[in-house]
């Protein structure tokens, strides 16, 4: 099935572990909550949006997080609780489609192409999912809606927290054009530096090159990868039997 015919959702809970703690402990609401990072060698699992304003992020050493956010409240993870809440969230997802690919406890792709006749278009399904997740868990989920997994994932991250971004079919290239290279999957600092040396400073610059030019400049694997993503041509299916690959970010 061609990408333009699909409706893919990427659902991503907002600061999941920290939001669960703030839900269960009202005294933490509005405070910079940091999950993990409490020991000398511990790293941060995630941080509330209040803590992120200080530059705290996942995988950061706890010592660095304390320097950036001295008022931060460090909380030991309760993985069994997060897993239980995750189960409730995925139960909601399964009400709309059996094509669910979990990426972690707090993140999943959903292919709702076959659900549109019953539940409405992608926006309508996303709105219902967001509403029902909140009713069940009191937690917010951001959702991106697009014709491919990659574009849906980028969209879900653009209006956090509690966001809903819909990329209509046929607008993928325009949607991606203004975004930085960091939004391309697999483009880390080293690859980004390579692209910038070649005069590519944003996704629009990558779009301006043909497939042949990109493959010639960066090799078959990377060149093809850049061409497919930058032009919104990701055709990978949602793999519903996939096992969650991680329980953290």
Image (tube, rainbow, N blue to C red):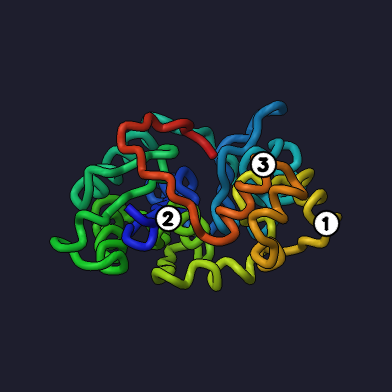
- CA separation, marks 3 and 1? 16 Å
Direction from residue 163 to residue 181 in the image, left or right? right
Q: Which residue lies at the image location 39% right of the left edge and 53% below the top edge?
A: 11
Percent across and percent down for residue 214 are 70, 53
Circles 3 and 1: CB atoms closer than 8 Å: no
Q: State the residue position of label 2.
A: 148
- CA separation, marks 2 and 3? 22 Å
Percent across and percent down for residue 183 are 62, 56
Direction from residue 229 to residue 103 in the image, left or right? left
Mark 2 vs mark 3, foreground winner is 3
Percent across and percent down for residue 16 are 45, 47
Q: Residues within 10 Å of mark 3 (few under 14, many from 20)?
A: few
Q: Quadrant of residue 182?
A: bottom right
Q: Which residue lies at the image location 25% right of the left edge and 67% below the top edge?
A: 121
Q: Quadrant of residue 113?
A: bottom left
Question: Which is nearer the eye, 189 or 49?
Answer: 189
Q: State the residue position of label 1.
A: 198
Say which label, 1 or 2, has the lower sequence index: 2
Q: Residues within 10 Å of mark 1 (few under 14, many from 20)?
A: few
Q: How many marks?
A: 3
């Amino acid at each position: 099935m061609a990408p333009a015919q699909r409706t893919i959702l990427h659902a991503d809970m907002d600061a999941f572990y920290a939001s669960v703690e703030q839900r269960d402990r009202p005294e933490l609401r509005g405070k910079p909550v940091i999950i993990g990072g409490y020991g000398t060698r511990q790293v941060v699992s995630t941080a509330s949006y209040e803590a992120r304003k200080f530059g705290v992020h996942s995988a950061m050493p706890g010592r660095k997080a304390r320097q950036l956010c001295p008022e931060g409240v460090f909380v030991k993870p309760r993985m069994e609780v997060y897993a239980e809440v995750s189960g409730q969230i995925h139960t909601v997802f399964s009400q709309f489609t059996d094509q669910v690919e979990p990426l972690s406890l707090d993140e999943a792709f959903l292919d709702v192409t076959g659900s549109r006749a019953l539940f409405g278009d992608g926006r309508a399904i996303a709105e219902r999912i967001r509403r029902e997740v909140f009713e069940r868990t009191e937690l917010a989920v951001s959702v991106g809606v697009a014709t491919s997994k990659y574009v849906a994932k980028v969209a879900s991250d653009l209006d956090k927290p509690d966001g809903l971004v819909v990329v209509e079919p046929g607008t993928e290239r325009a949607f991606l054009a203004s975004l930085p290279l960091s939004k391309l999957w697999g483009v880390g600092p080293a690859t980004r530096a390579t692209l910038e040396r070649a005069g590519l400073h944003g996704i629009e610059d990558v779009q301006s090159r043909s497939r042949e030019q990109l493959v010639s400049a960066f090799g078959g694997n990377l060149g093809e990868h850049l061409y497919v993503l930058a032009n919104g041509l990701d055709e990978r299916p949602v793999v519903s039997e996939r096992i969650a690959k991680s329980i953290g970010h």
